[in-house]
């Protein structure tokens, strides 16, 4: 497995990572990871996830999960779906924060 870490708290483990430098996308196969729903651990809630595939778009900074998805947000519970799920981020006071999770 390969591991990508962001901000020291968020991470993604994957069986394979494909970097498309021209398209500015990173694809993760069999991703499992954790992200914080907030700027710091004190402010946010942890979200654990897994899927068959995940794509990070550097232009929009969206994370898209695809295929056999499980998302567990500690304060809300667990979501299982085969539909595409998009994590959308926004910049708040110079920090990147999760704005919403959309099931397409």
Image (cartoon, grey):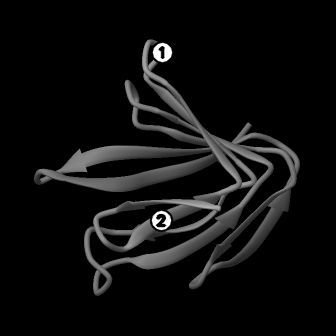
The residue wearing badge 2 is 11
The residue wearing badge 1 is 23
Task: In this rendered view, identify the residue nearer to me: 5 or 83.
Answer: 5
Relative to 27, residue 50 above or below: below
Give how far across and how far down residue 6 sits, in percent. 35, 60
Residue at position x 67%, y 46% from top?
16
Give how far across and how far down residue 7 sits, in percent. 28, 65
Relative to 30, residue 72 above or below: below
Tell me how many marks there are: 2
Q: Secondary structure at mark 1?
A: loop
Residue 31 lies left or right of residue 66; in this view the side is left
Residue at position x 65%, y 62% from top?
1
Looking at the rendering, which quadrant does residue 24 occupy? top left
Give how far across and how far down residue 56 sits, in percent. 51, 38
Looking at the rendering, which quadrant does residue 45 occupy? bottom left
Q: Secondary structure at mark 2?
A: strand
N-terminal of the pair, mark 1 or mark 2, is 2
């Amino acid at each position: 497995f390969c591991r990508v870490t962001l901000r020291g708290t968020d991470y993604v483990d994957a069986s394979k990572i494909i970097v498309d430098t021209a398209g500015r996308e990173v694809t993760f196969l069999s991703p499992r990871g954790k992200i914080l729903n907030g700027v710091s651990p004190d402010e946010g809630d942890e979200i654990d996830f897994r899927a068959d595939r995940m794509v990070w778009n550097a232009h929009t900074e969206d994370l898209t999960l695809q295929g056999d998805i499980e998302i567990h947000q500690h304060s809300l519970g667990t979501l299982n779906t085969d539909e595409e799920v998009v994590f959308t981020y926004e910049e708040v006071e110079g920090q990147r924060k999760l704005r919403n999770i959309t099931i397409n």
